[in-house]
Every structure is written in C-alpha cells, then in structure tokens.
C-alpha cells in the first residue's frame, strides 16, 4: 500500500466509472485516510451523488468471490482492510454494454460505480473488509430492477487471480446468465406532471414516437404535485427525471380572489415541492417557465434578466422558477405564446376566419391587439428542445425556447392565420390592448409588451430552433386537411 501520495482520479473505459488514489498517512501505529471527501473529490470529477447508506462486506477467507451484480443506485467503494481484485461490467443499454474494467483495490484506492454498472470482486487476503456508500435505500421495488451477468462468462475475458474453481461463490452467483442473455439495466423512471395539457400531450406523443421506456404520466387527478401529502405515493429513489408540464395558466383568473390561491399553489408551491424531492433523490427536474416573469420593457429577454412580473400569474411563475433553481439538477425552459393540441390562439383564429368568410354568419371582422410583440412556441418544438437538453447532458440552468424568426404582434399573427385559412387577412383589425379591454368587468392581468426571448443560449448547445412562421404554416395546413 502506497503512503503519502496525492489524491488523484483515473478514468476508465466504462463511462462514469472512475478510480481514486487516496492519500494514506501511516507510521508504526497504523494508518489514517480521508476515505470520502465530497468537496475535493467533486473537484476531480466525482458526481455529487448524495449517499444515504453505508454498507460493509466482510470476507473471512481469501478467495471469496461475489458478483456480477448491477443495482439501481450509484456506489462508492473502498477497502477498510485487505485487498480485492475487482471486475466491473457495463450493463446499461447502449454502445458500451458489455465493456469490462478490472483493477486491484487496497485501502489506498477507491472506485465510483455508476448505476447499472455490474460490480464484482474477489478477496485476495483473509479478513478483507469492503465498504461502500450508496445513494438509495434498499426496497423490494429496487430489487426488482437488479440485473446480473455470470462471473465465468468467457466473453468477458476476466482473469481472476484465484481460479473460480477454487474460489468461494454463492449458488446464485454461479447461475447468473451469460452476457448474451443478460438483461440491460432499465433507466430510472421519468415522471411527467400535467400530462393532459398541451405540453403534456406533446410529451406523450414524443415518447410514443420514439418508443421511450419508463415514463409515467400524471395529472392533478392522479398526482396533485402542489399537495405535500401526495408525495408518499412514490418511491422517489426509482426516478431519475421529473418533467413538470403542469401549471395554472389562466392569467386573468389569477387576478381574482378565487384564482389567486390556486395560481400560487400550482405555480409556486408545487414546483417548490418538486424541487425538494428532486434535491433529496438526485432527480433532474425540468420545469416550464414564462415570459410573464418579466415586465416586458426589454425588446428581447435573456436568461439572466432580473425578475419583474407585472401580475399575479407572473409573480407565481417567478416564485416557482426561484424554487426550482435551487435544486442542483434543473432545467428551466422559459417560453411564451405556446401553441399545442387543444384550445389555442391559432386554432381559434382559424375558426374565426372561416366564420367571417361564411356569408351566412353576421361576423364581418375581428379585432386583435397589435401592441404585444413576440414569437409563437409550438409544443412539438419545446418537447424536442427538452429532450435535446436531457440527451446531450447540457449544463443545468435556464434556457429560453420559442420559435425563431421575426418578432410580430398578435394582430400580425391573426392576419397571417386568416390569410392562410380563408384568404381574408384584411378582416383582422388591429387594436391596442387598452382599447381591447376597455369594457372588461372582470379583473385583467397586465400583459408584457415585449415577450420575445433571446435564443442564443439554447442554440449554443447545438439545438436548431425552428422558424415559428414555417411551423405555423405547417400547423394550419395539417388542421385544414
């Protein structure tokens, strides 16, 4: 065992599997080491994996051999006394499935094993004590996700120092499947809230189209994420991602005595509870935000602009953003003027265009505000962007996402919809927001004048943002078929 070496890390051929050389300080009395030091090791590449349990495997005799087991948690392995020969096999689905790494560990070395990498070891000395930190508690549901491969599989080419014929193995380990028959470790589950809304429906379409596994779709009737008591329904250690597509979006109703508490509960308290559980269980949280968190004075908003909401809806969304930003693994997807399945502005304008064009209808023209400026966001594009950030492991943080292209007013958009639907764009008459709501009797939420969002940050990740006008033309064409 080496004494007085510096803490350092070595990567391996298995992604995420990293070996640590540990400083060990010794003299005639024995030795001392910092076995796990979060801050120093994170600086060298150890994920902040949040261990919740410490286990010790004591191996009485030289030759005890265990594995190969892949469990649904990350683990940090070190040796208290003795020495092992370790073999690790990537059992996660993907290009590196079946990759093998071997090394010896004594008290001066440690290894971080990511979820889904099969773990095995052989004790090389009597009385070897093997200790490991894990970031999930054992449960029956967890056990159902274990996967295994046989220690003796010749395709793994593991050169065990002590022949397996002479080693001490359990009957279960002797009968694990060969690699060709091994079941890949399923990914951690993804929970989607607000699954019945426009964005939730688009996520379901994407998941079905790409045949993604492990997704669970909820809405307020099955999981009210703003209610703390509902969280006990889930074993959160089984989840790796939450996509929060749920929100209270009735901006004018949020200004009413009835709607105000509902908006705060759904848009602020709910995201705060999701952020809490995401932090406790190392879950990635994707949360959808809004241009209403700004006052609309800037012609185009960046991700770093200070919050300055004008109304209750914007205030609740800003509060939700702040809560989510405090969980380490988060993506806040800020958007505006969302168009998806169900009731939306484009579909409404199409219906009105047809009505105006019908000689049997009394409606001759419509008025639409021309002093609110922005770009449309189609839910299909938003979903593509969300999965792009997840799949490319983009840096966590806030990202703007709308369609790209020209900044237009609602009246401009309505005119284009009318023209493409019935050729009657001249029937859209511009009006100011103040004029439009002049006779309103119910509370009206203030609207930002400028809703356009700067897209350079998400474009820098390699995501190509579709032009909203082309997306709208395609949408109208599909609706007219």
Image (cartoon, rainbow, N blue to C red):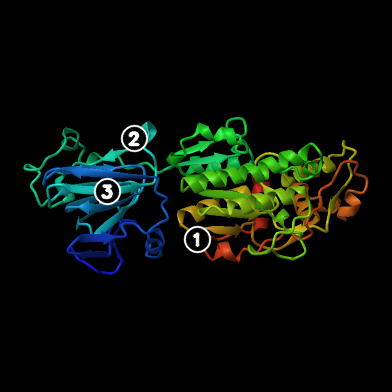
Counting from the top left corner in percent of width and height, residue 446 is at 81, 52
Question: Of the residues under marks 3 and 1, which one precedes in the sequence?
Answer: 3
Q: Indicate the quadrant where residue 480 lies.
A: top right
Task: List the residue tagged with mark 1.
Answer: 395
Task: List the residue tagged with mark 3.
Answer: 131
Counting from the top left corner in percent of width and height, residue 181 is at 24, 39
Residue 340 visible at all: no
Which residue is situated farthest in the front direction here?
29
Q: Secondary structure at mark 3?
A: strand
- Determine which of the numbered discs, if any, sits on residue 204 in the image: none
Task: List the residue tagged with mark 2.
Answer: 143
Q: Is 54 in front, or is 478?
A: 54
Task: Verify CB contact (< 8 Å) between mark 2 and mark 3.
Answer: no
Q: How many tags in the picture?
A: 3
Residue 253 placement, left or right of 150? right
Q: Secondary structure at mark 2?
A: helix
Q: Secondary structure at mark 1?
A: loop
């Amino acid at each position: 065992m080496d004494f007085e070496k510096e803490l350092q890390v070595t990567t391996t051929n298995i992604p995420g599997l990293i070996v640590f050389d540990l400083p060990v300080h010794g003299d005639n009395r024995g030795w001392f080491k910092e076995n796990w030091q979060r801050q120093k090791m994170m600086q060298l590449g150890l994920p902040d994996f949040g261990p919740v349990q410490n286990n010790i495997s004591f191996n009485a005799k030289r030759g005890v051999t265990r594995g190969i087991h892949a469990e649904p948690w990350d683990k940090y392995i070190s040796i208290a006394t003795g020495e092992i020969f370790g073999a690790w096999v990537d059992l996660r689905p993907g290009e590196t499935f079946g990759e093998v790494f071997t090394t010896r560990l004594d008290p001066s070395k440690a290894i971080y094993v990511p979820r889904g990498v099969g773990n095995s070891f052989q004790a090389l000395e009597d009385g070897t004590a093997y200790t490991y930190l894990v970031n999930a508690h054992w449960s029956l549901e967890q056990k159902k996700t274990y996967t295994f491969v046989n220690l003796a599989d010749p395709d793994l080419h593991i050169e065990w120092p002590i022949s397996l014929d002479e080693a001490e193995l359990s009957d279960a380990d002797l009968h694990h499947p060969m690699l060709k028959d091994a079941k890949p470790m399923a990914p951690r589950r993804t929970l989607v809230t607000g699954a019945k809304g426009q964005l939730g429906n688009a996520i379901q379409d994407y998941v079905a189209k790409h045949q993604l596994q492990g997704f669970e779709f909820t809405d307020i009737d099955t999981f009210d994420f703003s209610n703390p008591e509902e969280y006990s329904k889930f074993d959160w250690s089984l989840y790796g991602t939450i996509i929060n597509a749920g929100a209270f979006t009735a901006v004018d109703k949020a200004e009413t005595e009835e709607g105000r508490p509902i908006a705060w509960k759904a848009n602020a308290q709910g995201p705060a509870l999701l952020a809490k559980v995401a932090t406790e269980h190392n879950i990635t949280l994707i949360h959808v935000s809004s241009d209403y968190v700004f006052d609309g004075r800037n012609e185009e908003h960046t991700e770093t602009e200070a919050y300055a909401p004008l109304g209750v809806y914007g205030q609740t969304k800003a509060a939700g953003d702040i809560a989510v930003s405090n969980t380490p693994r988060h993506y806040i997807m800020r958007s505006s003027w969302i168009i998806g399945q169900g009731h939306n502005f484009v579909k409404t304008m199409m219906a009105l265009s047809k009505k105006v064009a019908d000689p049997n209808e009394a409606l001759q023209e419509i008025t639409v505000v021309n002093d609110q400026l922005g770009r449309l966001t189609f839910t299909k594009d938003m979903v593509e962007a969300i999965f792009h950030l997840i799949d490319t492991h983009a840096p966590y943080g806030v990202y703007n996402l709308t369609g790209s292209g020209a900044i237009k007013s609602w009246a401009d958009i309505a005119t284009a919809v009318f023209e493409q639907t019935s050729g009657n764009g001249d029937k859209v008459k511009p009006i100011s927001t103040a004029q439009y709501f002049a006779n309103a009797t119910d509370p009206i939420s203030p609207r930002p004048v400028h809703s356009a969002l700067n897209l350079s940050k998400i474009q820098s990740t390699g995501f190509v943002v579709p032009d909203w006008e082309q997306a709208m033309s395609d949408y109208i064409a599909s609706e007219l078929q």
